[in-house]
Structures are given as C-alpha cells and as structure tokens.
Amino acid sequence: MKFNEVGNRLYTGETSIDFVGRRKLWYFISFIIIAVAAFGLFGRGLNLGIEFKGGAKFNVPSLTSVEDARNIVKNAGVETSVIIAVGNERLEIQTPPLDETEIETFISKIATDFKVEPGLITTQSVGPSWGADITRQALIGLGVFVLLVILFLTVYFELRMAAAAIVALLHDLLITIGVYAITGFEVTPATVIGVLTILGYSLYDTVVVFDKVKENTKGIIAQSRLNYRESSNLALNQTLIRSINTSIVALLPVAAILIVGVGILQAGTLKDLALALFVGIAAGTYSSIFIATPILVQLKERQPEIQALTRRVHARRVNAGVDGPENMKITGSPILANQLMQAGPRTQPKRFTRSKRKKS
Amino acid sequence: MSAANRARPGRLLILIAIVSASTILWAFWPGASHEARLGLDLRGGTQVILTPELAPGTEGVLTQDQINQTVEIIRQRVNGFGVAEAEVTVQGSGANAAIVVTVPGVNPEGITNLLKQTARLDFRAVLAAGSGVEIATPSASPSASPSASPKAVVQPTELPIQAATSDELYEQYLSLNCFTPGLLQGGRADDPTKYMLTCSKDGFEKFVLAPAFITGDQVSDSQATLPQQGAGGWMVTLDFDSQGATKLSEASITLSKLPSPQNRFGIVLDGLVVSAPFFSEPILGGKAQIEGSFKAEEAKQLSQVLRYGALPVTLNIAESTSISPTLGQDQLSAGLLAGAIGLILVVIYLLIYYRALGFVAVFSLIVAAGFLWLLIIALGRSIGFTLTLAGIAGAIVAIGITADSFVVYFERIRDEIRDGKSLRVATELAWVRARRTLLAADFVSLLAAVVLYALSVGSVRGFAFTLGLTTVIDVLVAFWFTHPLVTYFGKSSWAESGGILTGVSRKRLIAGSTILTGSDK
C-alpha cells in the first residue's frame, strides 16, 4: 500500500492503529527508557561543562598531538587538564578554575610552545558559582513556564488535557537528560537551550494532536456511536500523517545542524544544541502520540459522563450484534470504519436510530 | 468561515506587501547600517559577565540604583579603555543581576582585571585645580639650561597618580593632558590615605587632591531636590553619619576660609572627580547641600553617585570568554551553511510530498526567512539585537516549526477533500480549523520564548529572542501570505481539476479506501 493510501485509510478509520488501547505497552516502553535514563542520571551523573562547574577552556589552533599538548600544558604549570582534539586543526584544553592573571600567564606560556599568536587562542573562564546561578535561573524559568502552560491549556482545552500534556513534557525532558547521562555527552549552556526548545516543541506537538482530539470529541456525550477512547484514537490516527510529516520537517533542519556541527566544527554550540534537539524532538513526537493521548483518555474515563457514554456505546453495539472496541485493531473492519465515518455529531442527526434509517 | 474571509485574499496580499515594503524600508533606511549585528561568537571578541555583590562587611541588599551606578562606572572604564563599540548591559535584576561587557574584535589585554575593581567613593580637599589640558610651564628661567627646557614630560598612562606627598605631583599636574587616550577609564588602585593627581570624569578639569577626609561609607543618604522657593534650581542634599559629620565640620571650618580653589573638595568616584563643589560656610550638623546650576538629570546622577558610596559593590567575574575572529568567522559560515542545508532539505521534502501546494509552502518559507533577515538588521540597529550562533540555531529550528504550520493546514485541506468537499470549500474550511490549531500551538511557543527571555542570562536570551521573533513571523506569514495564496490556488481551475501534480488530487486522496467516494455529499 502506498503512503498516501495509508493516509487515506487512517483518516477514515479503515486502517486504525490502536494507540490508546495498547497504552500499557507504550507505558512499559517509556518506563524502561526512563528507568535506564534515571539509572544513568543517578549512576554516572551528567558530564557538566565548565560553564556549570567552573573552570577555564582554551581553544588553540594547532596541529600538535594531544600527547605533546599535555606536556606543554604541564610545563605551563597546570597539572590536571582535559585535552580534546577538535577536528584536525584545533585543540581544546580544559583546566580547573584560573584567575585572570593566571589565565594571561598560561596563554603566553602555551602560545610560545604551540607557536601560535596569543590572540588566536580562544579562552573561556567561568567562576564556580555562576553555573549554579544559570542552573537555578533555568529551573525557575522551567517552573514558571510549566505553570503558565498549565493555565493556558486549561483555558484553551481543559485541566485534564493540560495535565496529560505536562506529563508528556516531563517524559521528554527525562529521556533527553537521560540520554546525556548515559552517553556522557558534555552538558553546556547550548545543551540547556536545546532542552528548553524541546519544552516548546513537545507542547506544540501535543497541542496539535489534542486540538484534533478536542474537535473529534466535541458533543461526544450527545451521541452513542463512539466512546471517548475510540474518538481520541481516531484523532490520533487522523493526525498521524501530520505528526510524521512534522517530525520529518523538524528533524531535517536539526540534522543539518548536527551534520555541520559535527562534520565541520566538531564541537561547540551547534553540536550540543542539535544533539539535544534531535533526541528531544524524537521523544516529543513519540510522547504526543503514545503517551499524552492515552493518559488523557485514562483521565477522561474517570469522569462519570464519559463512563456513562462508554456503557451506552457498548450496550448499543451488543444490541446491534457488533462487538465493542476489540475491533479497533491495526487493520480495522469496514463495519467499524463505517461507524466511525458516520460518528461525527455534525453529519448525523441524532434523533434517528440505526433501525429507522435502514427503512428509509 | 465568513464570506468576507473568503472573498478578500487580495486585500491580505496587499497588506503583506505593504508590511514587507515598510520592513524593507526600516531595515535599509538610508544612511544607517545595513548589516546584521553579529554577536562576538560570530566575529570574535571578549565578553565578560560580572555579578555585582555588596562589598564584604557591608549589610543590606543590592538595589537597582546601585546596579545602575555600577554599570555607569563600568561604562566609564570601558569607554576610557579606548576600545570601539564596546557594550555594557545589565541582564536580570536584584540579586540575579549580571553585567555583561562585550568588546568585539581582538582581546584587549588586562580588561578583565580593570573591570572587576571595586570602585571607591571619597571626598578629598582640592590643592590645585586647572583646565584639563597641558598648562604652559612658566618660562621662569629660559636661559638656565636651554637643553633641558623641552624636558621630555612623560604623559601618565593611567589615572589617578598617587603619592605620599603633594609636591611630587605638581610637575606632572602641569603637564597632564586629561584627553590623552585611555586616561579617563578609572578602575585603578585608589588609596584614600595618599595624595592624588587626577582629572574630572569628562576631562575638562584636573586636580591635585589631598588624602580623603570623608570616605563613601560615611555618607548615609543623598537626594536630588528642587527647593520649594524655586530659587537656585535643583540641588543635592547630603546626610552623613556621626563620624562623617565630625569630619565634615572640621574640614569645612578649615576649607571655607581658604581662597579658591583650596576651598573646594573633590567627590572622587573610581579615581575620577565627579564633582568639585566649594564650601561657602562651615557645615556643622552633618547635613549638607550642594547647590549649583544643576539640571534635574545632573542632580539625580550626582545623588546616585553619593548614595553608591555607602555600599560599594564588588564585582565577581562570573564568566569571561574570548573568541578569536577566525573562529568567529568559522562559526558564522558553519551556522549559515547549516541553515542553507536545512532549508533546502525541507524545501525538497515539501515539494515531493505536497507538489503544487508545496510551492506555496516554499514561497511562504522564503517570505518568512526574508522577514527574519530584515528584522534582524532593523532590530540590531534600533534595539541592539545581536545575532549569535545560538540565535542562528534558533532560526534553523524555526524552519521546521514554520513548515509545520503549513503541514497542519495542508493536511486539513486534504481531510476536507476526503470528506468530499470541493477544493475551494476545502481550503476555506481547513483554514478555519487549522487557524485555531496554529494560534494555540504558536502561543505556547511564544510563551516559551517570553519566559526564557525574561528569566535567563547570556546566550539563552539571544536564542529565546530569535525563537519568539520567528513565531510571530510564522503567524503573520501564515495568515497574510500562505492563506490568501492557498485561496487563489483553490480557485484555480487547474488545481480543482485534481491533476497529480496539484498535491490535492482527489483520486489520490481517496485511493485505497473503500468508503471515500470523492463525491460531494
């Protein structure tokens, strides 16, 4: 089947993937990933850049090997250092915190040994408390943002949707941070920016999906053809093509940043940012489909009116000799698909029952 | 869907044409700079982030007033240092305030040490005062030693010059030219127990000053006031603590009897004289006022300086970064390359998937990118927005988010066609639904950008600003450009014919389904 045909059948419900019904599977998958992430986070911890723990970083344009560089650095009086070759032409030297005078002496010493102009050496030095400040500010920002988003989503959608969206958001954040802990990639301010972007992106994606759910479930109480779970699942399937397309158009530019960041610059802002984004956008797409909506359905199904609806729909199907939601399997059946197509409150006058319509 | 909405795509296109024209005019205003302001990670330079803190041993909280005063002091230091285009800005407020000093280009040595000096405020009696330029040495003994008369007077390289006695300073005083580059930067060691040779902040006057008779911490308050009588204009009141009051009365009794300029005292901030009033009478109560032809602004500035003295601010170097211009250039080209590759990949994907409709999306992306570029130039000039690598990354990420607006809209059009609507109806119905989704989703993005901008420091801010800007552009382009264009597209008979290249082929949109018929219901 061609891609466009899949899209068409997803829209009608002829092809339907039971995202909501198999929620335990998705929760389990996420649980495993998050458990691994947490293990990494508490076990290895994050590899924080000097921006967070304080220290100095020097970028030297030089062809010198890392071993030779280590000796040069030792001769300059700095015992502990991390030296990384960045591409073929640059070396990055990380040292413990140095004060301004020490930095100037260090630069003049290594500049002679590396045979480079001191002005070509890029330096960065960060005081130890500054990183804590940045982190605290970022966390305050995160808190304020989450509160405002809950407020907005509650007004625009409803409280349950806001709650589900925030759970999906935290899910994405945990996974992204976990990936950093496990892989040991350095966490820099650029990484933080990437993670903060994921906040916006993850919610953006969830809002688009929830908007379809909201549309599909508008006036759902007034009918008895479809229960909330099926309606939401249909919404997911109907926006699935969009979700895939969105992820592709979002990941393509990020991939470009990653390629250029890794391929040309080897290190720095672009790479750190793109890595966080890549992981986060992938997690964001996953969670908006597999986590946010199933949680929403669970929350909704606690409401009495939604429970009543589910019972009504079930009773109606038993009468009609069609079984319930079990038919919502990956291929779907034309009978159910027909029901789905007719289900929308806007197309069917609700006073007619099925038997009456058959006569006409 | 309103009828008006459907009938007037042309008006929206005219509207966006006007907006574009004004933006172009704004960005390329004749005579102004037409280039984007690049951050120092893109063109090289030094950035120092300083966190102000109350000096040890003092109690109280850091007020905005003091932070502003500290910024003024640092600005004087940086400008005095003689580097072009240096910038001093404050981010955050109160205990979280950070002062960001940016010096583009090469790394001027020693600037970080200069910046972090704690500035002192002292009151010193004036011993000699004169115009800030070289004073011709009175040719008292022209014949004495002709060879020595053009005595090579070495201009000092920094101010103030301090000595244990005033005599040592007079010769240098005569030859001192306050306008020698680099002199008026302050930030140098300032020992209150020594004599001092220095200039006024603006360089118009130079002074030899006695050791401090009152130190800044003895000033308890200072206000700029306009007396009720209105006579004499603005003045600055001063309150001293008991120690300061005693010293003030002693000094004023002695000094007020002396002829000018010895009846004057210098208010010295950060090694430079901010003001040098004279005592008209002995002041005994610990309360003084400085009168003069002050403008309101000047009086306020002076009182701010005087209040600062009570709680001097120490500066910690939180972060200092210097990037060589070559690395900056590399980062800029890499960022632009990544942007170009990202844009091309998205364009290819949109064209393959949406065909003719994809062209609308591509045009919209180009319009959005154009707006972003123009606004970066215009905002760089008007509000000092600088483009950093993080900002470029934000813009690249925004390509995806902007393209997604089109994906949401186009998928809705296809859904409506699957429901059997005609293309023209489908484009309008889809817009009404997609519009709502877009606004909600973009609002969340904007919220993220605003919160990040308000609460963060440094590179995160640049990124948040770009993200917010692109979100606004996204909404604008979707409403005023993409939508009317799609409306025209929907009206065209070619698109309605549903050819395979249109991207809205009904045949393709019902293929594989046994339910969709494609006819109007």
Image: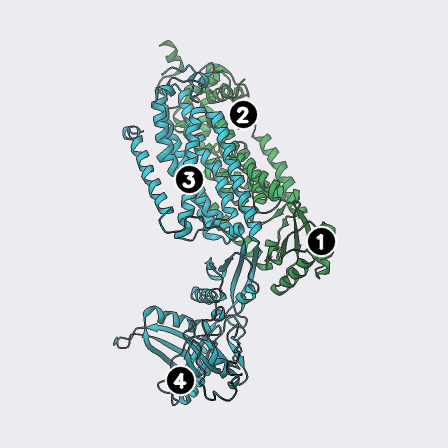
Chain colours: A green, B cyan
CB atoms of marks 2 and 4 within 8 Å: no
Residue at 64% x, 40% y is A35
Q: Secondary structure at mark 3?
A: helix
Decide: few, some or many residues near mark 2? Use Cα within 10 Å; few <14, some 14-19, many ≥20: many
Residue A150 showing in the rendered view = no
Question: Which amino acid does the dot numbered 3 rest on?
Answer: Gly
Furthest toward the top, the residue is A359
Dots 2 and 4 on the same chain: no
From this view, report whether residue A223 is shown above or below residue B258. Answer: above
Decide: few, some or many residues near mark 4? Use Cα within 10 Å; few <14, some 14-19, many ≥20: some
Pointer 4: what residue?
B261
Label 2 marks which chain's residue? Answer: A
Label 3 marks which chain's residue? Answer: B
Pointer 2: what residue?
A18
The label on residue A69 is 1
Q: Quadrant of the C terminus of chain B?
A: top left
CB atoms of marks 2 and 1 within 8 Å: no
The label on residue B370 is 3
Residue at 35% x, 19% y is B493
Decide: few, some or many residues near mark 3? Use Cα within 10 Å; few <14, some 14-19, many ≥20: some
> x, y percentage for residue A171?
56, 39
Q: Depth-wise, is mark 2 or mark 4 nearer the camera?
A: 4
